[in-house]
């Protein structure tokens, strides 16, 4: 049986970062196992290409349980299924979260994860095109830059938000997050800077790396309370590899707890239900699931007018835009589409920003079970930054090929409902600004007839959806419901760690790719210890 110093399960935002750091900073051997394929799709490097990747095999299209807090329907919850994970197929938005998010983690038992502890790792990861100094790095592998092309409609959104009272913020990752502006993106030299491209591509010919793609890990193999290897399935056949060092799970907030439970690590009652022998009782595995849930405000352009990116990905326009990008690195293909952002406080939980508005200069409804609206227009998607609603991930059976049972329980907490309603009102206020009316007509959704609290509840139930940020299912800390300690070691099992968004005690305030990469950076220091050369 082949043996390695480290086995990493999952080559996503955190996993590829971790593997790359171990290989570049030590003499260790690494086996990296990824369920998806290599990140070779021709659209992946293109900033605007992500929209075409959504329905492909490069994402798991998970389906949640019916959601009473919405309209009783289940929701599609896509997650990356390719080397680089979400960082290879997402909109590349670079948002770290608020400083107080990480201070909250420390107060909740994640000692050593306060803002001043994690800031050096954000800086170590980053080469920023525009910023440097106290908050930004200039020598890291991850490219962070300004968006290569910004629609005039997105500029209108930023002006409109200022018009109704939001302050302009040139850097959401600097001194404070609150305000409106244009996000930075994980792009270097006009190409996507995923964790795979930033950390791993330079190591693919390293003889100390064994990269296994298209493989699903079915269990962590344990011996005398220690992780000694994994079993994985590829092309219908079972394989085992071993380690004298550690197994690190970086498969994400859905697959990581599933794998722990399949390996006998989890809530005893859940394991017993599926006839799985308990190797380590851990009641928090799969619990504390939460995700950002967004709701749209949409307005169409007036008849015979076309603003934004409608139709820019079709026919001759697509060909022209592609040629322009390849020749000059400019034009609509250089955009990540999600250009304008506003972080605001509803006032329901103090002055700290508690909602995020993301602006798209097109009509965007990606529920995947509703007809596509083919009209030019604009969308403001608004979500609660720190949701209180909590769900869970459990097993469908002991068969590793069966998907996990995902129940986010979106908007099951009344505070989340109240904050969503207020955030929706704030987005409608921005859309109604005269500065937005230069581009769009009256609001179409929720629409002028949707005014009462009952009407808005119905609208939220029908159109509320994921922002693709599941977190928390293997939370870090020291309480009874924590799954890993502050060095990411699984309680009750030696030689086993978790390094992905599942360890977040509370999801960060914003997009989760940057924090996940930071977790991978931090994990590399924990894992290597004195092995670093």
Image (cartoon, rainbow, N blue to C red):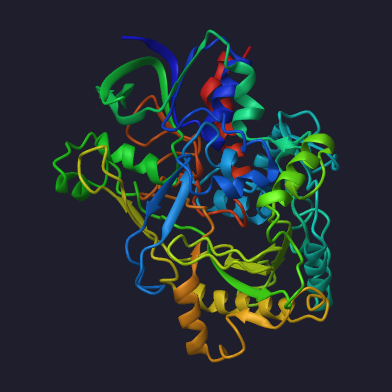
Q: Is residue 516 visible?
A: no
The image quadrant that residue 391 belongs to is bottom left
Pick the quarter of the image with the N terminus.
Answer: top left
312 vs 406, left or right, is right
Tell me the quadrant of the picture where the C terminus can be found.
top right
Hey, which quadrant is residue 347 in on the image?
Answer: bottom right
Residue 436 place in picture, x, y as percent: 78, 75
For residue 20, side relative to residue 257 (left or right): right
Q: Position of residue 120 (x, y in %)?
A: 71, 36
Could you tell me how many numbered marks the image carries? Answer: 0
The residue lying at 79 percent from left, 65 percent from top is 153
The extreme front residue here reads 316
Q: Vertically, is 123 above or below 350?
A: above
Q: Nearer the viewer, residue 275 or 381?
A: 381
| x then y, percent, for residue 483 | 39, 43
Q: Residue at x 42, y 57 (%)?
A: 76
Q: Position of residue 226 (x, y in %)?
A: 31, 24
Residue drawn at point x = 73 percent, y = 51 percent = 317
Viewer-side residue, 518 vs 466: 466
Q: Is residue 68 visible?
A: yes
**In the image, is 333 to the left or to the right of 224?**
right
- Image: 138 above or below 454: above
């Amino acid at each position: 049986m082949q043996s390695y110093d480290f086995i990493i399960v999952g080559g996503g935002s955190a996993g590829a970062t971790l593997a790359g750091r171990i290989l570049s900073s030590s003499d260790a051997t690494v086996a990296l196992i990824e369920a998806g394929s290599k990140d070779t799709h021709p659209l992946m490097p293109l900033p605007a290409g992500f929209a075409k990747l959504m329905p492909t095999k490069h994402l798991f299209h998970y389906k949640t349980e019916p959601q009473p807090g919405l309209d009783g329907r289940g929701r599609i919850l896509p997650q990356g299924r390719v080397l680089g994970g979400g960082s290879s197929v997402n909109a590349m938005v670079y948002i770290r979260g608020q400083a107080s998010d990480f201070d909250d983690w420390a107060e909740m038992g994640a000692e050593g994860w306060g803002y001043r502890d994690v800031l050096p790792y954000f800086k170590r990861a980053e080469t920023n095109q525009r910023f440097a100094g106290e908050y930004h790095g200039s020598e890291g592998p991850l490219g962070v830059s300004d968006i290569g092309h910004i629609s005039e409609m997105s500029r209108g959104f930023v002006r409109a938000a200022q018009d109704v009272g939001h302050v302009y913020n040139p850097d959401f990752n600097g001194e404070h997050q609150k305000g409106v502006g244009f996000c930075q993106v994980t792009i270097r030299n006009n190409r996507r800077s995923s964790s795979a491209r930033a950390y791993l591509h330079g190591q693919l010919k390293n003889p100390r790396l064994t990269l296994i793609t298209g493989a699903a890990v079915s269990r962590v193999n344990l011996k005398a309370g220690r992780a000694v290897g994994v079993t994985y399935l590829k092309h219908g056949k079972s394989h085992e590899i071993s380690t004298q060092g550690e197994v690190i799970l970086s498969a994400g907030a859905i697959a990581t707890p599933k794998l722990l439970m399949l390996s006998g690590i989890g809530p005893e009652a859940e394991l017993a239900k599926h006839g799985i022998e308990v190797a380590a009782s851990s009641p928090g595995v799969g619990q504390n699931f939460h995700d950002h849930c967004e709701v749209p405000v949409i307005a169409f352009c007036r008849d015979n007018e076309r603003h934004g990116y409608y139709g820019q990905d079709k026919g001759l326009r697509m060909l022209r835009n592609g040629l322009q990008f390849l020749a000059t690195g400019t034009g609509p293909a250089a955009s990540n589409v999600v250009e304008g952002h506003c972080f605001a406080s509803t006032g329901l939980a103090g002055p700290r920003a508690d909602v995020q508005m993301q602006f798209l200069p097109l009509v965007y409804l990606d529920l995947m079970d509703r007809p596509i609206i083919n009209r030019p227009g604009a969308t403001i998607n608004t979500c609660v930054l720190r949701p209180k609603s909590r769900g869970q991930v459990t097993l469908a059976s002991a068969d590793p090929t069966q998907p996990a049972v995902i129940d986010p329980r979106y908007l099951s907490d009344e505070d989340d409902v109240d904050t969503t309603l207020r955030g929706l009102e704030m987005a409608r206020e921005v859309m109604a600004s005269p500065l937005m009316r230069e581009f769009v007509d009256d609001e179409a959704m929720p629409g002028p007839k949707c005014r009462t609290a009952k009407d808005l509840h119905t609208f939220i139930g029908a159109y509320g959806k994921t922002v693709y940020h599941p977190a928390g299912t293997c939370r870090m800390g020291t309480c009874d419901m924590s799954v890993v300690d502050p060095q990411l070691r699984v309680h009750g099992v030696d030689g086993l760690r978790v390094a992905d968004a599942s360890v977040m005690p509370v999801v960060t305030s914003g997009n989760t790719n940057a924090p996940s990469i930071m977790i991978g950076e931090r994990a590399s220091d924990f894992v290597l210890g004195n092995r670093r050369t």
